[in-house]
């Protein structure tokens, strides 16, 4: 039984690595460790002032430029580090000065149903959207799954892959 579990784990790690390399052209490593050197020069990058999304329930979500907004670029199916990051973001969910948005980046596998299952598992009750045409990946120059950006006053003030809560806490205070 242990051997079967180990084989399944190895297949999952290889699959995630393959996805990261083929989808984003970056290298991937196992265990939720940094999967690339990340987003090229995005900190300080201006973003559109009227940034808005439609979540999986069809509701409009608009980024308030006067609040710090965490954008988590993730995969809801088969990405254990993405689930870990979502769970760690719970620490900031009740902060009135912080908004959270989950952005599913694999529309071939991420559906409304898989994202709902993911949010039930992680208890992440903030809006989640699907980047159907990869326009958000391109806009924010995301090169890795499990990327977290913090947007404030129309600029990216933080960018990281699977950041620790303490890293985010420094940016969100």
Image: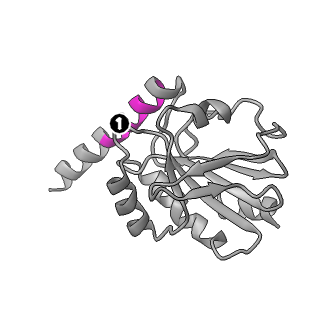
Quadrant, the C terminus: bottom right
Quadrant of residue 96 within the rendered picture: bottom right
Magenta segment, which residues? 12-21
Q: Position of residue 66 (x, y in %)?
A: 83, 60
Q: Nearer the viewer, residue 12 or 97?
A: 97
Q: Position of residue 33 (x, y in %)?
A: 54, 46
Q: Which residue is mark 1?
A: 108
Residue drawn 53% across the image and 61% down it: 86
Quadrant of residue 127 within the rendered picture: bottom right
Relative placement, left or right, of 83 versus 60 is: left
Tell me the SS state at disc 1: loop
Residue drawn 80% across the image and 40% down it: 43
Residue 13 covered by magenta stretch: yes
Quadrant, the N terminus: bottom left
Instruction: Check the image and report above or below for 76 versus 41.
Output: below
Q: Nearer the viewer, residue 37 or 102?
A: 102
Q: Nearer the viewer, residue 95 or 134?
A: 134
Residue 118 in view in this figure: yes
Q: Position of residue 171 (x, y in %)?
A: 80, 59
Instruction: Check the image and report above or below for 172 versus 44.
Output: below
Residue drawn 51% across the image and 50% down it: 129
Q: Position of residue 118 (x, y in %)?
A: 39, 60
């Amino acid at each position: 039984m242990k051997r079967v579990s180990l084989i399944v784990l190895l297949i999952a790690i290889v699959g995630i690595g393959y996805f990261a390399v083929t989808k984003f052209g970056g290298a991937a490593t196992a265990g939720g460790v940094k999967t690339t050197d990340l987003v090229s020069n995005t900190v300080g990058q201006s973003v559109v002032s009227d940034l808005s999304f439609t979540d999986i329930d069809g509701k409009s979500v608009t980024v308030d430029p006067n609040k710090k907004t965490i954008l988590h670029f993730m995969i809801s199916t088969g990405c254990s580090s993405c689930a870990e990051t979502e769970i760690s973001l719970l620490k900031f969910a009740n902060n009135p000065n912080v908004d959270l948005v989950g952005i599913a980046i694999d529309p071939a596998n991420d559906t409304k149903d898989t994202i709902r299952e993911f949010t039930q598992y992680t208890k992440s009750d903030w809006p989640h959207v699907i980047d159907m045409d990869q326009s958000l990946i391109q806009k924010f120059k995301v090169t890795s799954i499990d990327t977290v950006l913090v947007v404030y006053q129309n600029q990216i003030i933080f960018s990281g892959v699977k950041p620790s809560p303490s890293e985010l806490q420094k940016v969100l205070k």
